[in-house]
Amino acid sequence: MSLPRSSNTPSPATLVALLPEVVSDVAEQMFFGWAEACDAAQSEALIRDSLASAGPDWVHVEVAFRGAIDGVLHVALPCDLARDLGSAMLGMSDGAALSGALLDDAAGELANIICGAVLTRGEQTTQFELLPPLISRRDPSAAALTTGVSFFTINDRPMIVRFAGREP
Amino acid sequence: MSTAAAKSLNLLVVDDSAMMRAMLTRAARLSGLPIGAIHEAANGQEALALLETQSVDALFTDLNMPVMTGMELLRIIDERNSWPGLLRVVISADGSAAKRDGADALNTLRYIEKPFKPEAIRDVLAALL
């Protein structure tokens, strides 16, 4: 399906620039978390700490979108962080009580909301379509080594976001 | 619904994310407002089946869902006119003007854009009552 384009369609770089504000808002409002952008060196240190304390189990989410700009938002975060965010969303005190399926669901919803908010705030008037999140479990290296990524901390743990968009 | 001070609202929450359904259910239960049954559906098709068999006062639906989207669900509800008193609320990560206008045209009372604070659900429920 071809969605209508607007004459004031923002560039992908403009949308990437919205990520820090959007990630902070989503973490705070939906997951009661504290998020901020960080640089690659800080992220690398956080990833190292995370690998040492929680192991290499990371959840990766890809949300494809179509509209004035087509592309994919990729979010990667440690499973224990996704578990804690999901628990906070549901008001649970014990993150371990969150099942694996709900953990994936929490990560998927996190990525879905970030993607929707970036596109909404950037495009505002134009129509877009979000596809269902694709979720996988891998170590963080695949995301961290990719070019064009943005690094964040949420509750002092690492999260990697890559917004790859192109005009169709 | 202004005369329903003693009445409780029966809700139908439609979202393909179990987390979102649980979060919305929790927010409604913690709102301090008279909430009755809360039914859950993972897509528009499941929601229609529940509407056929359950008493529902207010529908909270996501838009992007597999099988049947929220917009398709709202369109069918509007066309059938079988639930004229059903209060319709959209909750979506897509806050574009195009989607808002589309929902407005299908008699949606409120459009909640993600991210939102849980208090937003309480405020909408209070307004519906």
Image (spheres, rainbow, N blue to C red):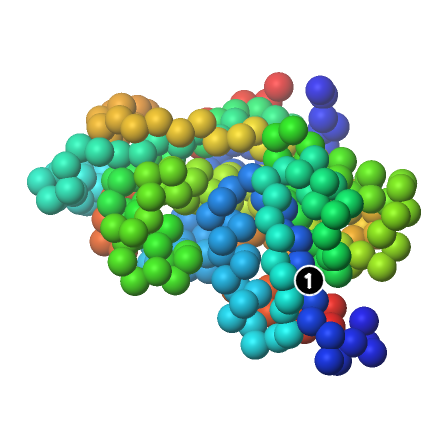
Instruction: Indicate the secondary structure of the residue bearing disc 1.
Output: strand
- Left or right: A120 in relation to B23: right
Frontmost residue, A68 versus B73: B73
- The quarter of the rendered structure image containing the C terminus of chain B is bottom right
Q: Is residue B70 above or below residue A165?
A: below
Q: Report which quarter residue A67 is drawn in.
A: top right
Residue visible at 25% across and 50% down in the picture:
A96
Frontmost residue, A127 versus A57: A57
Q: Report which quarter residue A70 is drawn in.
A: top right
Residue visible at 66% across and 53% down in the picture:
B12
Rendered location of residue A140, percent (x, y):
24, 30
Residue visible at 89% across and 41% down in the picture:
B79
Point out the residue furthest to the left here.
A52
Rendered location of residue B30, percent (x, y):
51, 71
Q: Is residue B128 above or below residue A64?
A: below
**Residue pointed to by mark 1:** B10
Rendered location of residue A134, percent (x, y):
45, 27
- Left or right: B59 in relation to B22: right
Is residue A118 visible from the viewing direction of this image?
A: no
- The quarter of the rendered structure image containing the N terminus of chain B is bottom right
Q: Report which quarter residue B5 is drawn in.
A: bottom right
Residue visible at 27% across and 40% down in the picture:
A79
Point out the residue furthest to the front here.
B53
Frontmost residue, A17 versus B86: B86
- Left or right: B75 in relation to A39: right
Is residue A105 visible from the viewing direction of this image?
A: yes
Q: Amino acid at mark 1?
A: Asn
